[in-house]
Image: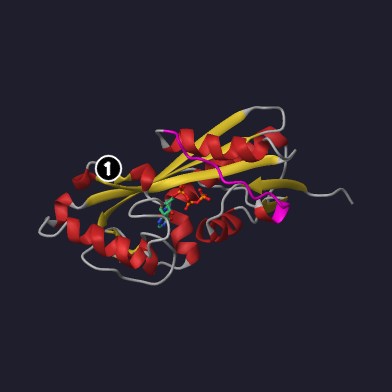
Amino acid sequence: MAEKTKIVFATQNAGKLKEIGEILKDLDIKVLSAKEMGIEISVEENGSTFEENAVIKAKAIAQVCEEIVLADDSGLEIDYLNGEPGIYSARYMGEDMPYSIKNAALVKRLEGVPEERRTARFVCVIAAVFPDGEIRTTQGVIEGRIGYEEKGTNGFGYDPIFYVPELGRTTAELSDSEKNAVSHRGKALRKMKEELKKKMQIGGNNENIDCK
Ligand code: ITT
């Protein structure tokens, strides 16, 4: 039997990896993290957009392996804070600062701000670098509001303060599959799945992929 095509996902974020594995599991490919490939390089994310940073991460890993490499750059944009923390979402208040503190600080910065001005979105760009050098990117967005306190324990990062009005819950109150169905990462990855299928002529067992 032919070996499955391998794809390397260039992320060190365990929360992302869990979601990515779930979303790509129906593709006939093996998804490995860079760490599982024995690649441990730190990449300077010095781009000025999610797209630039996703491409920077994927290219850095693609330089040291021969597989297809995917990377995710994502973050939370809060309108009242002029788009902060945006591309600096992981670095906001320091990479090692617990999210309970980062979330409390953001809620505090929105103290007194009424519901309709608490709009925010999660954005995700997935970049793919193929062995022939071709680069493709896809994007997904989920709109929501910043809550008044942390709610929920699922997900990771800013999920406990990201309230989705249509669902009446934060993304940390959604199950893994509920979050993947509506999230920025779910949307971007489902689009990337289509790109991978076209490029590699690989199959999957999900014929009705929703690419909203
Ligand atoms: P890698 O670069 O290794 O992939 P990272 O966490 O540094 O991991 P980013 O630079 O893309 O990744 O920063 C993304 C940050 O945005 C992440 O650390 C969270 O703070 C936030 N974020 C992105 N997607 C999120 C989600 O689905 N739920 C909650 N927070 C999210």
Question: Which quarter of the picture shows residue 148?
Answer: bottom left
Q: Residue at x 44, y 33 (%)?
A: 47
Quadrant the C terminus occupies: top left
Q: Which residue is drawn at 31% across and 60% down?
A: 102
Q: Mark 1 points at which residue?
A: 83
Closer-to-camera residue (197/51):
51
* 194 left or right, relative to 54: right
Question: What span is colored magenta in the figure?
Answer: 36-47
Q: Which amino acid does label 1 sit on?
A: Gly
Q: Which residue is drawn at 29% across and 53% down?
A: 144
Any part of residue 118 in sight: yes
Determine whether 26 is above or below 71 in the image: below
* 67 left or right, relative to 211: right
Determine whether 35 is above or below 136 in the image: below
Magenta: main secondary structure: loop
Q: Residue at x 46, y 35 (%)?
A: 51
Find the residue positioned furthest to the right.
1
Query: Residue 61 at x, y = what percent?
Result: 64, 41
**What is the crowding at mark 1: few (fewer than 14 residues within 10 Å), some, or many (at least 20)?**
some
Residue 21 counted in the magenta span? no
Query: Residue 96 at x, y = what percent?
Result: 42, 60
Any part of residue 193 in sight: no
Query: How is the rendered protein coloured?
Result: secondary structure
Q: Mark 1 vs ligand 1: CB under 8 Å?
A: no
Tally the numbered discs: 1
* 186 left or right, relative to 136: left
Question: Which quarter of the picture shows residue 82?
Answer: top left
Determine whether 70 is above or below 19 in the image: above
